[in-house]
Image (cartoon, rainbow, N blue to C red):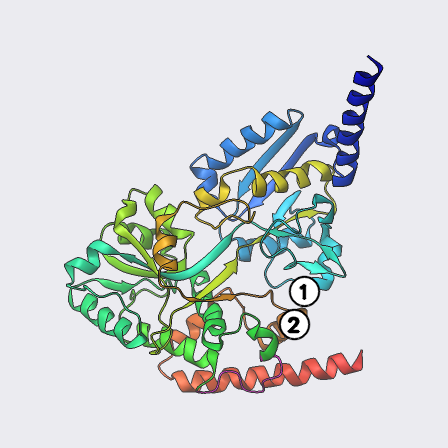
Amino acid sequence: MKFVSSFLLAILTGWLLLGLFNNICYAAVTGEITFYSNRVDLVTNGSYARWVKEFQTSYPQARVKVEGIPDYEASMPKRFEARNYGDVMLVPRDMPKQTYSKYFLPLNDLQLQDKIYFPNNWEFDGKQYAYTQGVIAEGLVYNKRVFKSAGIEKLPTTLDELMTNAAKLKSAGKVAIALNLGAAWPLQQWDKSAMALASDGNYFARMITDDAPFSSGKPYYQSLKIAHTLFASEYSEADFILNNWEQSKRDFIANKNAMFFLGNWVIPQLIESGMRSDDIGFIPFPFDNSGKPKAILNFDWGMAVSRYSKNPDTAKAWIRFMITKSDFADVAGFIPTDKSRNTAMPQLAEYMDYKPEIIQAAPESNDFIRMANKAGMDFMSGNYIRNILISPDFDGSMAYWNKRWRQAKENFQATTFGE
């Protein structure tokens, strides 16, 4: 009997020690938290309501309120200024890392570092302040029915083939590729493309030392030239003012649009809106004429916990649940952040059948973000790219941005050396 009691005591002690190791007391997972999400669609369709219910099954004393924020990038800065940004939120892309501790709590105590992709993206001074919602493969999402109706049998593996296919689609009365200039944020793909064209996921760190990164032959010039050609050739939608993001998805489903250049996350949105999965294809974007495909493996927004949260243990438990327990990645169209979990998306299998060179995007450095801000680039937000695309003088635009970048670089160096 003594042996049994000792054995049970040892198990109980182990459980308690495990709880201490994780530094989150299950009894402390109580109270209400608010999560501000960019995925309004998942709030509207009830997915988040289901995940909240599943979370509360494990933590019955906890309450989670999820608010979807349209145009998240533009809407959240005012909330941060007013300290009204909830308990769990997504880290603004242009926020310098040295300011993280002003707004967020470290997440190291979740002990997820060795189990997830991109664990150090939001790290500063050894503290990890956020973990990505999901992992993204960037590429061409195409409508198989539209391609077939336009007589396109060979999928593009070179840039010339892509332009030839776009011309055929235009002749067939289709929008070859929806760039979504009016929404602006989808244009961030052309920021990301610079990494593929440089074959370097850490390209932005190198860009800091370049006086003229928008010059002919360089990755940014090549990327933006592709986008400009697509728009100037009228292969994309004509409207560059209105936010037609939701309409572009409906038009894709209605066989009016043929392609998107986006991450695989958009595929479940199309399926949920009524499109058959079998009619959706996904391949690497052909950035050049080498015929050698490249795949950008990227990270989505990082989830963080407010340093002002009244229930930080509940907030941290919510992040751990979303990453390790929920089916968020499958529903949202991501590769799961948790490396031990697989995706069943057939389009990703098609994509990887091309055996592309994998380019894993590195997080942007503080210095790059500061320089981009000084130059006036709304990096990963798209407005400066929209202005370039609608300009009739592409090379003039590139000269302008070289000048802005050079001035920012000189100003940045003067400030840095003066500190």
Q: Earlier in the sequence, mark 1 or mark 2?
A: 1
Question: Closer to the camera, 360 or 204?
Answer: 360
SS of the residue under disc 1:
loop
Instruction: Point out residue 58 in the picture as x, y percentages from the top left corner.
Output: 62, 27
State yes or no: residue 20 in magenta: no
Proximity of marks 1 and 2: CB atoms separated by less than 8 Å: yes
Query: What kind of residue is marked 2?
Result: Arg
Q: Is residue 276 left or right of residue 335?
A: left
Q: Is the N terminus in the top left, top right, bottom left or bottom right quadrant?
A: top right
Instruction: Point out residue 25 in the picture as x, y percentages from the top left corner.
Output: 75, 33
Q: Is the C terminus in the top left, top right, bottom left or bottom right quadrant?
A: bottom right
Q: Residue furthest top?
A: 1
Q: Which residue lies at the image location 73% right of the left edge and 63% below the top edge? A: 98
User: In whole angstroms, how far apart are the C-alphas of marks 1 and 2?
Assistant: 7 Å
Q: Residue furthest right?
A: 2
Disc 2 marks which residue? 370
Bounds of the magenta segment: 207-216
Q: Which residue lies at the image location 50% right of the left edge and 64% below the top edge? A: 381
Q: Is residue 315 left or right of residue 13?
A: left
Q: Which residue lies at the image location 45% right of the left edge and 58% below the top edge? A: 137
Our reading of the magenta stretch's main secondary structure is loop
Disc 1 marks which residue? 96
